[in-house]
Image: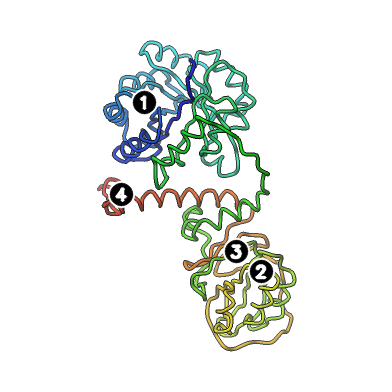
Amino acid sequence: MNFIKPVLQVALDVLEAERAIQIAKEAVEGGVDWIEAGTPLIKSEGMDVIRQLKAAFPGKTILADMKTMDTGAIEVEMAAKAGADIIIILGGADNSTIQDAVRAARKYGVRLMADLISVSDPAKRAKELAGLGLDYINIHVGIDQQMVGEDPIKILVNLDIDVPIAVAGGIDAESAAKAVLSGASIVIVGGNIVRSSSVTDSARAIRQSMDAPEIRRKTEKPIEEKTLELLKTVSTPNISDAMHRKGAMRNIRSIFPGLKMVGRAVTVQTFEGDWAKTVEAIDVAGKGDVIVIYNGSPHVAPWGELASLSSINKGVAGVVIDGAVRDVDDIRPLKFPVFAASIMPNAGEPKGLGEINAEIQCGSQVVRPGDFIIGDDNGVVVVPKERGYEIARRAVEVEKNERRIRDEIKRGKTLSEVMYLEKWEKKK
């Protein structure tokens, strides 16, 4: 099949038919060609959502992402009779399932796309599937794989098959252009359209980048730098949601509202009022680090104005104290982020007991040297260093979803209506 221009396909990975149709209408206004009922939507609403999409968009190609792994003929027949023009099956399915699905597709006059998500050797499997009669091959990196940095375009550039190639997995305007220049005939976009605050504008931007693709050369940033940049764009509630409501410190709050803090942890284990190690940690900390202190008492402060001023000179991003801080009237004009359990005028003595850069407990959370620490007016969250990039990416997706919900509320819906709470309540 020859394309005059590459196809833009929107993946409706939402749970409600009403929301899916509304998003699809806005996406079509932005230049979307094909409309996919995503697997979550099909599982939620069944085949009826295919019928609804076909009725709402009679002139558009409708895809059913069945993710078929077995019973190929049955599932192809089911989707075809519901009105799907293209049915998506899993490329990792056994060849007998693939062949049966192909036979059913020919019988019912529909086309088949194979999704290569999680296939260990996608280039090899793509050639095999092309030989089995698939109409399209989808190079797909799943959401969880995207969160750890997998990129479908790296796979795409190594393919050499005659079947039209689709690409999916975190595609935005920039990577859509790169996909087209790398040989993709179909660009599949989910979250970057569906969760956008303006579906139409986002779809239009991707459409334009596909129609006039160009690649902007840029230096790849180190993973730590990318992680910190992403964490600065999201809130601690976004991050907590991305971690399944984990990671938040207890009883630690921002002393100076309006200040945000993001950095890597330099930990301090000290004892009631002993401020020697907390001050020595400033010398150990690098630019952009966060000093995290377990003090052991909310009644004696191991930190004050002079330590804050010294930290600013060193480039420290902030301090978190499971304990007290003092001199807040002098620290406030410095605009230095301080998060603590309490405010007390009492100071202790620099006895030198304790340890720097050991694993500690702070706000009932385990904190290790190098963990990511994020603080804002909602509190402080700890992100394990080995999951930093993944959690940052997931938090960005949480923020996108909330942005979309916020826009629907602004249009007049209540939160319960937007969330379809009554529909999803457990029935007796």
Q: Which mark is residue 366?
A: 3
Quarter of the image for residue 291 reads: bottom right
* Residue situated in front as seen by the camera: 421 or 310: 310
Q: Nearer the viewer, mark 4 or mark 3?
A: 4
In three-dimensional space, the C-alpha distance between marks 3 and 2, rounded to whole angstroms, equals 21 Å
Type of amino acid under label 2:
Val
In the rendered structure, which disc, 2 or 4, sits on the residue that comes first in sequence? 2
- For the residues bearing labels 1 and 4, Cβ distance under 8 angstroms: no
Q: Could you classify mark 4 by the number of other residues whose Cα lies within 10 Å: few (under 14), some (14-19), or many (20 or more)?
A: some
Residue wearing tag 4: 418
Type of amino acid under label 3:
Val
Q: Residue at x 59, y 21 (%)?
A: 125
Q: Could you classify mark 3 by the number of other residues whose Cα lies within 10 Å: few (under 14), some (14-19), or many (20 or more)?
A: some
Q: Is residue 413 above or below residue 129?
A: below
Residue wearing tag 2: 316
Q: Nearer the viewer, mark 3 or mark 2?
A: 2
Type of amino acid under label 4:
Val
In three-dimensional space, the C-alpha distance between marks 1 and 3, rounded to whole angstroms, equals 49 Å
Q: Is residue 110 left or right of residue 217?
A: left
- For the residues bearing labels 3 and 2, Cβ distance under 8 angstroms: no
Q: Is residue 361 left or right of residue 170?
A: right
Q: Position of residue 279 (x, y in %)?
A: 70, 77
Q: Is residue 88 left or right of residue 319?
A: left
In three-dimensional space, the C-alpha distance between marks 1 and 4, rounded to whole angstroms, equals 25 Å
